[in-house]
Amino acid sequence: MAEIQYLLWLSTCPGLSPRSQVTLLRYFGSAERVYCGRGPDYEPFSLSGRAKAALGDKSLDRVQRILERCDRLGLFLLTCQDSTYPERLLQLEDYPLVLYGRGRPVRFDEEAAIAVVGARACTPYGVKMAGRFGFGLARAGALVVSGLAQGIDAAALKGALQGGGAPVSVLAGGVDVVYPRQNQWLYEDVAAQGTLLSENPPGTGIEGWRFPVRNRILSGLTLGTLVVEAGERSGALITARNALDQGREVYAIPGPVDGPMSVGANRLISRGEARLVYGAWDILWEYESRFAHKLRHPGLITQETVDQRLAAVPTPPPEPKPEPKAAAGELPVLPRTQLEQMGEEQREIFALLAEKALTADDLVGETEIPARRVNTALTLMQTMGYLKELPGRRFAAAVRFEDQG
């Protein structure tokens, strides 16, 4: 436990870059020895006055507040000295000493993890492609890793959730800070089914400079980075550059030659820095033998069905629409087409909840759908306003559809 405190102290010293933190840790041999150092011990390093002052502050009050907050929020800590810390990250010269997480811990070295990145101000084409690739990668057993920004990040994460995956979102602020606020529902979905990670302590606010620093973790955790859409100066290109510098693969989806949001991806392809891909297996084929226990070739599914599933999740959630008036005690009636847009598993779950209130565990038992997909379906249908939660974590239909009893 003591070493964790010293790692937290070192990783939160103001003025110390991640690279400087790693350099000090390697030189002294442990975070405790860095902590016990005195002014002259730090002279061999080119440190700012602010960094030297921070290293001279031996108070652990800040560390104690962080630990208490993590405990209160139910967060987990992963340090660079833990056996489960990703070897992929340890290969970096500026790996994070500590990761804060919400959700399920992930053994990244055992996962065929692929980062999906792109522009916030993307086109409808970009949203569609990011959703399709997120869906396809997750359905094939890959782990989708992205940020939580509007645009490509959000579309890829939603696609992965709809594909039955447990995606990972690496945040620029604290793991408890939702940004942008309109993605609160997506943040909760990823936390429930996958993992939220950050190198920053809980409560850390959003500052622009944190995003490019964060991007090295996105590429570092993964086997390769897929660029969906990127303008000429997009942050996604920083992630792609990090991936290349880290010796990882880069993939890109081509776009219209005259499209401003296609400049970055097209240029990566033309320079030979990224492989042009048309589908998930254009990425995954080279990892199939290495991750045979994870990757799979799922049954065929039409693109129309995929697009219907992806369209069922709003971005951002729309303002509540006026519901048809219903008689006292009756549920509002919605068009049958909305029921048909649900995925097969969602329709099966809704049919049961239209008859009686059930818990998530009840639904797993009655449908034989895996628990994580049941929970995802419940969250999505609540977001759409189709379900309501009752006391005792039971769920029931909040609407009924035309031609439904």
Image (spheres, rainbow, N blue to C red):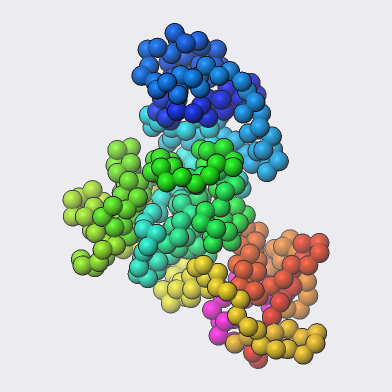
Q: Is residue 289 visible?
A: no
Nearer to the camera, 346 or 63: 63
Q: Is residue 41 above or below residue 298?
A: above
Q: Quadrant of residue 18?
A: top left
- In this view, the residue farthest toward the left is 271
The count of marks equals 0
Q: Which residues are magenta?
A: 336-353
Report x, y in % for residue 377. 62, 66
Nearer to the camera, 195 or 34: 34
Residue found at x 53% / y 30%: 12
As for residue 374 lying within the magenta part, the answer is: no
Report x, y in % for residue 347. 62, 76
Is residue 11 toward the left or the right of residue 65 in the image? left
As for residue 352 lying within the magenta part, the answer is: yes
Report x, y in % for residue 231. 29, 58
* Quadrant showing the C terminus: bottom right
Is residue 403 toward the left or the right of residue 252 in the image? right
